Amino acid sequence: MWHEINNNNDLADFMNTICSFHDSCIKEMKYFSGAYVDDDLSMYPVNDVRALTVIVQRQYQENSMIEMEFKGLKCLQLLPCDDNYTCEILDSTMLLKDGCIYWFDCGTLPEMDFDNYKGNMISALKLRWRSIDNCMGQKEFYTSIV
């Protein structure tokens, strides 16, 4: 069942439910722009969907794997750690501002540092999430049909 984030109460409930992403990691992402080239090679070059889905796995029994769907993606900033560092999320910041939802993989981000943030960040017009059962581990959740 999908849970919509429509206001600060929904957001606070979500962050409490998933313990602000403590002891979690981004496992996978999938992006759908809405643009495409058809079989006859005609192009629809408009990014009118901009949907990003993110799989996060957590070291908790309840809601151990969640899927977040960001619609109307505004920004995706990925700065993944290299092989010499771990990528677990210890805390995060998530807020609603100016009609957008923002997620940062750091829990102590001052609001004024948005433009200078050097970690993973997502902003979009909408967010919904759901818990996924029985899919833990390294096997890919988003698989190709080709």
Image (cartoon, rainbow, N blue to C red):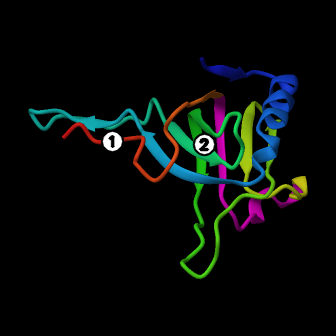
Label 2 belongs to which residue?
74
Q: Position of residue 144 (x, y in %)?
A: 28, 41
Q: Residue at x 60, y 66 (%)?
A: 79
Q: Position of residue 6 (x, y in %)?
A: 76, 21
Residue 44 in view: no
Residue 79 in view: yes
> Dot 1, how many residues are within 10 Å of its Cα: few (below 14), some (14-19), or many (20+)?
few
Asked if residue 85 is positioned above or below residue 30 in the image, the reply reads below
Residue type at tag 2: Lys
Could you tell me which secondary element the residue under label 2 belongs to? Answer: strand
User: Which residue is at the far bottom?
Assistant: 84
Q: Which mark is residue 83?
A: none
What span is colored magenta in the figure? Answer: 112-127
Q: Residue at x 81, y 24 (%)?
A: 10
User: Which residue is at the far left?
Assistant: 40
- Which callout, 1 or 2, points at the residue further toward the start of the chain? 2
As measured in the structure, the alpha-carbon distance from the residue carrying label 1 to the one carrying label 2 is: 25 Å
Label 1 belongs to which residue?
143
Query: Residue 42 falls in which quadrant of the image?
Result: top left
Membership of 116 in magenta stretch: yes
Q: Quadrant of the C terminus?
A: top left
